[in-house]
């Protein structure tokens, strides 16, 4: 059974800092991994999707890496801003699977 | 192109009642997945519908049921509501989701059971 863990559970940083969010998964037979952002009480916004054959994806100030063999992914946020404050979730999809398995998320607060 | 929409936004029900939540998929998408997100947790997979047939189910009891219509919109029905059913219910649509299509999420329905 796939389990996804996100560390840290919560993070508070001053504006302008670069930061790294971590995601680990127990079964390396994944099809893809996705990072989402969720604002309080809202739905999920997809940030980056990495296929199992890829090592990283970049979008603006965000960079996500994937090391399938070790069961790890990181989301790097450069020059953080107060508007980045949200919960960040990672989710994996196994080979031949139809569902996303989510971690519990990292709550990020960027202080101005 | 419209995104995924869900209705209602919020809902308050009493324990033992029944509820129906609705989801309209993104234009062109033929797959809808439903997830339950309890407070402080990640979403949990309930089930998926592909071309009007159930295509996989998570660890939820039979009182959670669903439908997908010919226009690929979907309903989630929950009977005999329990207090623990209070959560944010998210639907996600995708193209050929059973074959790995990326899932796009709606804004969710917040269900409170009292």
Image (spheres, grey):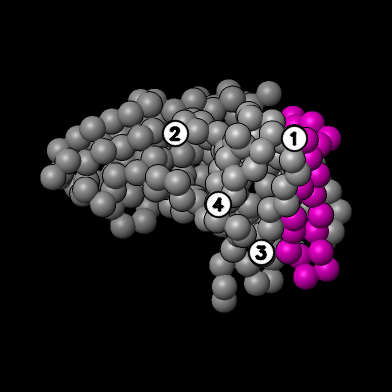
Q: CA distance from mark 3 to mark 2?
A: 25 Å
Q: CA distance from mark 1 to mark 3?
A: 29 Å
Q: Residues within 10 Å of mark 3 (few under 14, many from 20)?
A: many
The residue indicated by pointer 3 is: B25
Q: Residue at x 65, y 72 (%)?
A: B27
Q: Is residue B50 magenta?
A: no
Residue A67 vs A82, above or below: the answer is above
* Quarter of the rendering containing residue A22: top left
Instruction: Residue B82 in the image: state x and y as whole percent.
Output: 69, 31
Q: Which mark is residue B16?
A: 1
Q: CA distance from mark 2 to mark 4?
A: 23 Å
The residue mark sitting in front, 2 or 4, is 4
The residue mark sitting in front, 4 or 1, is 1
Q: Which residues lie in the magenta part?
A: B58-80
Residue B113 vs A9, above or below: the answer is below
Which badge, 1 or 3, is on the more N-terminal residue?
Answer: 1
Q: Residue at x 63, y 30 (%)?
A: B83
Q: Secondary structure beneath disc 3?
A: loop
Callout 2: chain: A
The residue indicated by pointer 4 is: B10
> Relative to residue B48, is residue A91 drawn left or right?
left
The residue indicated by pointer 2 is: A105
């Amino acid at each position: 059974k796939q389990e996804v863990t996100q560390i840290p559970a919560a993070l508070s940083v001053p504006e302008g800092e670069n930061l790294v969010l971590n995601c680990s998964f127990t079964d390396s037979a994944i099809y893809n991994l996705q990072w989402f952002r969720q604002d309080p009480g809202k739905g999920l916004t997809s940030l980056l999707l990495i296929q199992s054959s890829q090592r990283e994806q970049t979008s603006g100030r965000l960079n996500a890496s994937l090391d399938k063999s070790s069961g790890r992914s990181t989301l790097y946020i450069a020059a953080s801003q107060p508007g980045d404050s949200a919960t960040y979730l990672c989710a994996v999809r196994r080979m031949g699977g139809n569902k996303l398995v989510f971690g519990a998320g990292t709550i990020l607060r960027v202080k101005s | 192109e419209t995104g995924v929409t869900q209705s209602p936004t919020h809902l308050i029900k009493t324990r033992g009642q029944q509820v129906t939540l609705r989801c309209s998929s993104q234009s062109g998408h033929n797959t809808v997945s439903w997830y339950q997100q309890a407070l402080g947790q990640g979403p949990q997979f309930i089930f998926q519908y592909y071309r009007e047939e159930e295509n996989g189910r998570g660890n939820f009891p039979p009182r959670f049921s669903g439908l997908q219509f010919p226009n690929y919109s979907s309903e989630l029905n929950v009977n005999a509501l329990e207090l623990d059913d209070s959560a944010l219910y998210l639907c996600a649509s995708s193209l050929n989701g059973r074959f790995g299509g990326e899932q796009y999420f709606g804004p969710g329905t917040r269900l409170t059971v009292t």
